[in-house]
Amino acid sequence: MHESEALGELLDEREHLMNLAFRMLGSRHDAEDVVQQTYVRWFQLDDDDRDAIERPRAWLTTVASRICLNILDSARARRERYVGQWLPEPLPAMTTDAASASAPAIDPLDRITLDDSVSMALLVVLESLTPAERVAFVLHEVFAVPFAEIAEIVGRSPEATRQLASSARRHIRDLRARPTEASEHARLVTAFRQACESGDLDALVAILDPGVTSVSDGGGKVRAALRPVVGADNVARLLLGILRKSPGLTADEEEVNGEPGLVVRAGDQVVGTVSIGTSEGRIRNVWMVLNPDKLAAWNG
């Protein structure tokens, strides 16, 4: 194979690495750093070492996963310094068609595939796993990496690694509500938007689960609730209060992390996204990302 062709194939793995790193970290910025560091390590190898690597994708996956594991190990300390609640980064439905949609264009190699594994509901639960559990779950359940290879990454035996993934699946099953049908999810998003726009407290409370929890991520950059707000009446009053204090905001129904959600704008600027978690015909979770640093992909 010609050297330029080999280099092209190697760089084509960037999309795969972005998808892997984002699911592990929940941050596009951190995922981009991981991909860059991974390629730096590849090009730091001497020619003989590179030639000895039979499966470059597997090598890149291993290196990227180890970098992610290191970042996850230090994430708890970083989150303790974070102002307020931390939420994963919301993703728009990326497009390279300049004539389409409201989402910005993006290099296809930097695109993150949107599916259930990047839904806000799952990413939030992944945050509660240990770093090793998260890496094992993402590699095996999403990318079908064999346990023997994952074991080398997390520094455990293959059997212990299998147990990590099993523990992660149980934890996710226990914490995550069973996803509703896509049509029902979309119906609740529409009802949520309409109730918020009309200012109808009773209508909003009616579609919220009595134990609904709202989490707002402002990152200290904009005003946001510093703690989760719990209870249908409390959450409804919080949301309607925000809208009353900011009459110029508009909310559009758009895809957020691969699911119907709301994109909040002040003029042409996206100032927030709203994702919802649903269960048994009601809204169980409201996740609002307001930190402008996490909205760059929406305003690019």
Image (cartoon, helix red, strand yellow):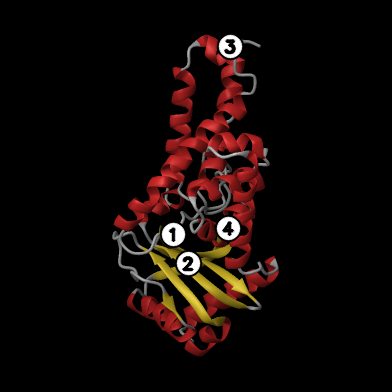
Drawn side of residue 167 relative to residue 72, left or right = right
- Residue under label 3: 3
Measuring from the top left, give residue 127's x and y in whole percent. Answer: 48, 56
Quadrant for residue 70, please give it. top left
The kind of residue on which mark 1 rests is Leu
Q: Residues within 10 Å of mark 2 (few under 14, many from 20)?
A: many
Q: CA distance from mark 3 to mark 4?
A: 39 Å
Q: Which mark is residue 87?
A: 1
Please say whether residue 111 is visible from this viewpoint. no
Measuring from the top left, give residue 42's x and y in whole percent. Answer: 49, 22
Going from the N terminus, do you reach mark 3 or mark 1 first? 3
The kind of residue on which mark 2 rests is Trp
Q: Are marks 3 and 4 in contact (CB under 8 Å)?
A: no
Q: CA distance from mark 3 to mark 1?
A: 42 Å
Q: Which mark is residue 119?
A: 4
Q: Are marks 2 and 1 in contact (CB under 8 Å)?
A: yes
Q: Secondary structure at mark 2?
A: strand
Q: Are marks 2 and 4 in contact (CB under 8 Å)?
A: no
Q: CA distance from mark 2 to mark 1?
A: 8 Å
